[in-house]
Image (spheres, rainbow, N blue to C red):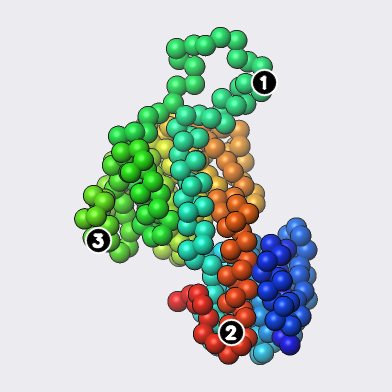
Amino acid sequence: MAKIFVTREIPEIGINLLKEKGHEVSIGPEGSISKEELLEGVKGVDAILSVLTEEINGEVMDVAGKQLKIIANYAVGYNNINVAEAKERNIIVTNTPGVLTDTVADHAVAMIFAIARRIPEADKYMRAGKFKAWGPKLFLGGEIVNKTLGIIGLGRIGSAVALRMSKGFNMKVVYYDMNRNQELEKEHNFEYRELNDLLKEADYISLHTALTEDTKHLINKERLALLKPNARLINTSRGPIIDEAALIEVLKEKKIAGAALDVFEKEPEIMPGLADLNNVVLTPHIASGTKETRDKMSEMAANNIIAVLDGKEALNPVE
């Protein structure tokens, strides 16, 4: 019997899988977990099932002990885990790729429409009882059909968004990625652009890149200045990819049409002034938030732990 610590409450399907294998499972609090609670929880465990809000660094690994074999992250991203420190200690790190692709892509598409057609702003207007009569200029939004969509990061999620919008709404897709995908270019007429050229051209820009040292503040003050006045920026990847303070300034000055954000630079906090703007849509990091997807993530994380503790290869090792 192995000891497993789950840093936060997750859907029961994964927990039950671990218990059915005879493992001892302890679970952190439903809300956020403090550093002290995290360090106490990992003592002497063979596996950690972490969520993206917890930093799993060398200190956490050392407190867990030399018997720690795997850290299974309940997310596709794993910037909350120090993978290099894990490798030094021969600890396997896994994530949950694939199962949340369609769900996150759907949310990105929903955010595109929400900011384009000013839906949250109009909803607030209606609830305040301000609607008195139809007007020719009331909440004029932006067109989507036949416009240009810029995808930054043409991985699983980025390509899923691109396909939805190109096939469903006849959008021209331009993309930037560290690795060109000429197969998708040929098959779906996606066009590669250097990053600055994409920012100048696109009407909608959707971010789908991982957070690394190279991508932090990838969208900074200088690059925001390249966007067209009618451009709208959508982020369902990781908050620090955008310099949030710089974004607030261009939104305040209406130098771009709007932004839709599901993730934030200092999450769960958002920069002062962001929530006061009408030309922004904000959701609380729920792009993967469907019951079906969160269950699949729980199941995948648990199965990675089960495989490693059984002496088998991890199903989804990172790097």
Answer yes or no: do the residues labelled 2 and 3 have beta carbons within 8 Å? Answer: no
Check residue 128 in the rendering and tell me which mark sits there, or answer none. 1
Q: Establish if 137 lies above or below 316.
A: above
Residue pictured at 44% horizontal, 26% vertical: 141
Check residue 308 in the rendering and tell me which mark sits there, or answer none. 2
* Label 1: how many Cα within 10 Å (few below 14, some 14–19, many 20+): few
Q: Establish if 101 lies above or below 316.
A: above
Mark 2–mark 3 Cα distance, whole angstroms, equals: 35 Å
Check residue 226 in the rendering and tell me which mark sits there, or answer none. none
Residue sitting farthest toward the front: 20
Give residue 91's quadrant in the image.
bottom right
Q: Residue 26: give x, y in percent of width and height.
A: 77, 74
Q: Amino acid at mark 3?
A: Glu
Q: Establish if 251 lies above or below 140.
A: below
Quadrant location of the N terminus in the rendered image: bottom right
- Residue annotated with mark 3: 183
Q: Amino acid at mark 2?
A: Val
Which of the two discs, 1 and 3, labels the residue nearer the N terminus? 1
Q: Residue 155: give x, y in percent of width and height.
A: 38, 60
**Mark 1: secondary structure:** loop
Give residue 275's quadrant in the image.
top right
The answer to whether residue 269 is left or right of residue 109 is right
Res 42 visible: no
Q: Residue 103: give x, y in percent of width and height.
A: 52, 52
Q: Amino acid at mark 1?
A: Ala
**Mark 2: secondary structure:** helix
